[in-house]
Amino acid sequence: MTAPVFRAVGAGALLADFGDVIDEALFARVVALDRAVAAAPPVGLVETVPAYTSLLFVFDPLVTDHVAVEAHAARLIAPGGDFTGAHTHEVPVCYEGDAAPDLAAVAEWLGMSGEAVIAAHLAGEYRVFMYGFAPGYAYLGGVPEALHLPRKAVAVRGYPVGSVMVAGPQCLITTLPMPTGWWVIGRTPLRVLDAGAGRPFLFEPGDQVRFTRVRAEALV
Amino acid sequence: MSVARLRIETAGPLTSVQDAGRPGWRRFGVPPSGPVDRRAFAAALAATGGKEVGIEVSLGGLSFTCEGGPVAMAITGAAVASVNGVEVGGWCVVTLQPGARCRVRESGGNWGYLAFAGEMDGAAWLGSRSTHLIAGLGAGRLEAGAAVSIADARDRASVSIAPPPEAEPVAVARVVLGPQQRFFADEVLARLTGEPFAASARFDRMGMVLDGPALTPLRVDMPSEPAVRGALQVDGDGRVSLLTADHQTTGGYPRIGAVVEPDIDRVAQLPAAAALRFAVVDAGAAVALTRAAAARDAAWLAQVRAGCRARGSLLTANLVDGVVAP
């Protein structure tokens, strides 16, 4: 495995870039570095932000600089990485009626039955790769290839919080009622972002997610 | 000790409560938020001795009635105010008497700030009252009918506030190239510094679209990477946007560069059609520029604090008429 490329980002951040390909082995190195930094942070570090292929170091430029942060980070890079210690979350999903407004369209697009779409979605092994777009929007990789479909041409509004949606190889559980071009195939009563909680985010990047099927009564 | 209450009558769609921001949660998709123009916000707090929290005003302005009080209010940034129909301008401290009607509107830029001598209320989320506007998290957007309470409200003398060291609109913003400069051909990179850009009216708390040459990327198939405030993000058509306070924490559009810390908020303040050019600096220079600006800003804010305090006590002593808080 090659060492990451470090790239300066403005005055107060540094990106450790591990490559251009989305895969678990590469992402495991991102997570490993993120954990190593959490255990031994460089002076002046504000926070780190993991993504598919890179880890961002945000630092206070009044205290440190790119050179010092890179030197510290380079010492923490391991040749590989695994997801030891990552949690596995079971997420109940209702795939019925109002909770699954796009299920029929997805089934038609893919030439599958609705039940086959549900079975394929349940069979996926999902990994939390990163958060983005908006608070609590966790991008889950691992959608089975049979379910890969492009996003809609136009974003649609009106989906409630907890909508489970797919586009391409990704799956996402909404935390806000925002317009989206992804396909909503179910809904969960679980909240990825609970604004009332002390630690309000359900997943850490690197965690695994398994979906289980529940009836509509579970949504109440 | 008195309590003042601001009863909001009209508010533009981008009007919200802010504090210094909410760092530390980017990994969960939460940007720091806070004021778009951090210098102007800090000056409003320094001039009133306000406790951390203020109001950010933009397009559409804000009008409200003050109940209770009196309370001193600072107006900074790109905004001017009138009190009971009398223009008081901007970059000043005025006192609102009970029943005063105040109108604030943007002037000469995009973002204005109000802070009050006392303790403004507002709900905290993750330890900060800053509002993430599209999510509605934090103390929140101010809308018609809302009320804001200021505990321990105090009077202060009317004074003007010295504007920041860099008061004139920014003409050349310094930029560190990258981190996704590999997505741009050399001649497109050259256009960033060689051709003129301009501010546009298409802005919100997430960012501002810039007018200028298309900086079309070679491809847009990158996996989403983390983004920062100040990033110059380029969409598939080559349109450039500056990311600001409520920016997305990750995104799949390449960032051609990042504006250096002291210039970010000044670009965000530029009114539509204001001319802008970019100059490339290296990362070391960006850090040096940031440190120099921070030292200048700290000295200026100390002056604002001292100026308002000294004149405040002097004039208050001459104006004692029974409404001065202890």
Image: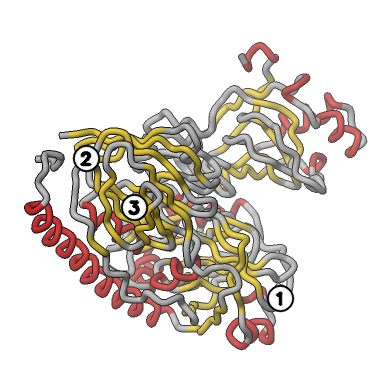
Q: Nearer the viewer, residue B218 or B209?
A: B209
Q: Residue at x 47, y 43 (%)?
A: A84
**Residue under the point 60% across and 66% down:** B241
On the image, which quarter does residue B232 sit in? Answer: bottom right
Lower position in the chain sequence, tag 3 or tag 1? 3
With A60 as the anchor, is B310 left or right in this view?
left
Residue B20 numbered tag: 3
Q: Residue A160 versus residue A16: which sits nearer the camera?
A: A160
The residue closer to the viewer here, B309 or A46, is B309
Q: Chain under label 2?
A: B
* Left or right relative to A54: residue B167: left
Q: Earlier in the sequence, mark 2 or mark 1?
A: 2
Residue A175 appears left or right of B215 = left
Residue type at the position of mark 3: Ala
Q: Amino acid at mark 1?
A: Ala
Q: Which residue is mark 2?
A: B153
* Residue A68 relative to residue A164: left or right: left
Looking at the rendered image, the quarter that the C terminus of chain A falls into is top right
